[in-house]
Amino acid sequence: MSALHPPLARPALRWGAAALLAASALLGGCAVVPAPVAVADGDVYTTVEPPTPQYEVVPAAPYVGAVWIGGYWNWYGGRHVWVPGRYVRPRPGYHWQARYWERGPRGGWALHGGHWVK
């Protein structure tokens, strides 16, 4: 027996190595993926003021005529969640009305827009 690994330590090393191998196998397939953001059709109401819009770097258009739709703060799960901007195919004869927050007459906030307008 070596001085570094006395007889009682070898089984513990084997179990430790086996546990480490099992944990690696279980966690090796894990991935951290952002949670999907629900986008509501129609108006959204809340009493919480939306944060200032985030600055977005608009990437190069993926194809000629692509329309950039800027990101916005959505209300989801009891909090504001940033929905990043994206490119979409244009609709001939229409323009995109961006989503926007408006303070209501009773102090709440309403999210409007997000649709094509003729």
Image (cartoon, rainbow, N blue to C red):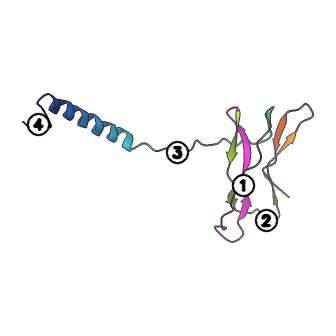
Residue 89, above or below 30: below
Q: Point out residue 12 in the picture as x, y percentages from the top left corner.
A: 20, 30
Q: Are marks 2 and 1 in contact (CB under 8 Å)?
A: no
**Label 1 Cα crowd, 10 Å radius (few <14 / some 14-19 / many 20+):** few
Q: Which circle's residue, 1 or 3, is located before the other in the chain?
A: 3
How crowded pointer 3 is (Cα within 10 Å; few <14, some 14-19, many 20+) is rated as few
Q: Earlier in the sequence, mark 4 or mark 3?
A: 4
Q: Secondary structure at mark 3?
A: loop
Q: Which residues are magenta?
A: 58-78
| Distance of label 2 from label 4 (alpha carbons) | 81 Å
Q: Position of residue 103 (x, y in %)?
A: 88, 39
- State how far apart marks 2 and 1 are (Cα): 28 Å
| Residue occupied by mark 3 | 33
Kindly identify the residue that appears in the image at 80 percent across and 53 percent down: 98
Residue at x 83%, y 64% (from the top left corner): 93
Q: Which label sits in the foreground, 3 or 2?
A: 3
Q: Return the mark for residue 55.
A: 1
Mark 3 residue type: Val
